[in-house]
């Protein structure tokens, strides 16, 4: 078919010349077979639609899913980094960007995926932080159990040695009155009130405690084993112990400015609960510890498996300074 105006050769389905824009006149019978009539305008079954001088529709540019893609990337990063503190940042950012992407219909699918990944990363981060806060080191429990066994064996050997000591024999010719007098003298300490004796024991122990020096003890721990120390700390966390473990606490010393977040030490509570001097220590309490250093405690971080040795005091007495 030839355009009557410009003379260009055209396909039979063209209604408008794509070169000059003039309408194409066709045979009526042929038009009835190949097109539908809508008033005075004929629409071909196939081919290009023309409006005015345009032969084809202009393609509209598609919107880029920038926010959705960014939300998905941050969500994946939040899941991968959820085991460390910085992992919470991309996880939260992924949730925020995902909500924005859904509201603006900018990458809705990627935004939803980013929100899901961000929520999962946040949940994993919270779980890991709670595990770290309540981490119990198996090595500390084993060391404490061994210490208790050694102390118990020492007490038994001491009691056996006391039993094996030879008793002083009295001279048969010694008068009976002197014997009775000596027995009465030996019974006098038993007449001393138990409360006064307990007070004296506590005072003697406290007076034997020297000032706590963390660096000296940590540098040469073997030189200070068995010595008594006093130190004021704030309790960070407390473990009630179990069947084979003793109650212990994580505490921090004063950094010099009144803030207790300097050196971390373990405190094993060995107070006599039946004593009137017993102090029920709670978390965040500021107390003065009077205890004995029995060696470094080997600990293991359950999160990353790192092992370390920390300073620990076995607390005999405690004095409550303040409670928060």
Image (cartoon, rainbow, N blue to C red):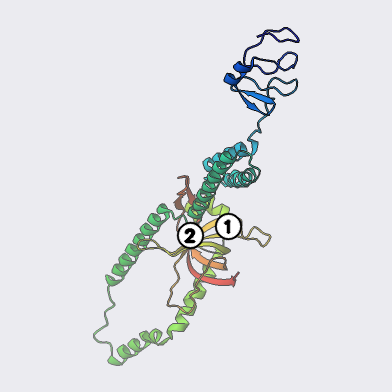
Residue 30 or 70: which is nearer the viewer? 30
Residue 47 or 284: which is nearer the viewer? 47
Disc 1 versus disc 2: distance between alpha carbons?
12 Å
Rendered image quadrant of residue 58: top right
Q: Report the quarter where the N terminus lies.
A: top right
| x 65%, y 31%: residue | 62
In the structure shown, which secondary structural element does the residue marked by tag 2 occupy? loop
Mark closest to the chain's N terminus, 1 or 2: 1
Number of numbered discs:
2
Q: Is residue 226 left or right of residue 34?
A: left
Q: Is residue 255 left or right of residue 5?
A: left
The residue under label 1 is 213
The residue under label 2 is 293
* Residue 324 coordinates in the image, percent (x, y): 60, 69
| x 60%, y 71%: residue | 321
Q: Is residue 200 above or below residue 125?
A: below
Q: Is residue 196 left or right of residue 24?
A: left
Label 1: how many Cα within 10 Å (few below 14, some 14–19, many 20+): few
Residue 147 or 243: which is nearer the viewer? 243
């Amino acid at each position: 078919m030839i355009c009557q105006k410009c003379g260009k050769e055209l396909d039979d389905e063209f209604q408008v010349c794509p070169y000059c824009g003039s309408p194409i006149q066709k045979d009526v019978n042929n038009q009835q077979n190949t097109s539908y009539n809508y008033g005075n305008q004929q629409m071909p079954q196939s081919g290009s639609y023309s409006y005015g001088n345009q032969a084809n529709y202009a393609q509209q540019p598609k919107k880029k899913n920038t926010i959705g893609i960014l939300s998905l990337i941050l969500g994946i990063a939040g899941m991968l980094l959820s085991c460390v503190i910085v992992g919470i940042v991309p996880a939260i950012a992924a949730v925020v960007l995902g909500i924005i992407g859904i509201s603006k219909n900018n990458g809705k699918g990627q935004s939803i995926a980013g929100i899901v990944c961000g929520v999962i990363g946040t949940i994993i981060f919270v779980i890991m932080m709670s595990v770290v806060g309540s981490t119990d080191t198996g090595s500390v429990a084993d060391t404490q159990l061994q210490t208790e066994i050694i102390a118990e064996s020492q007490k038994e050997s001491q009691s056996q040695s006391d039993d094996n000591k030879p008793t002083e024999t009295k001279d048969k010719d010694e008068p009976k009155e002197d014997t009775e007098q000596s027995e009465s003298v030996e019974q006098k300490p038993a007449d001393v009130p138990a409360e006064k004796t307990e007070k004296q024991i506590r005072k003697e122990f406290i007076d034997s405690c020297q000032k706590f020096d963390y660096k000296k003890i940590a540098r040469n721990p073997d030189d200070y084993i068995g010595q008594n120390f006093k130190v004021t700390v704030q309790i960070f966390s407390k473990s009630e112990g179990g069947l084979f473990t003793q109650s212990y606490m994580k505490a921090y010393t004063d950094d010099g400015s009144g803030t207790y977040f300097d050196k971390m030490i373990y405190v094993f509570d060995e107070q006599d609960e039946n004593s009137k001097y017993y102090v029920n220590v709670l978390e965040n309490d500021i107390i003065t510890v009077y205890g004995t250093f029995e060696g470094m405690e080997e600990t293991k971080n359950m999160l990353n498996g790192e092992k370390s040795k920390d300073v620990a005091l076995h607390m005999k007495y405690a004095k409550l300074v303040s409670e928060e």
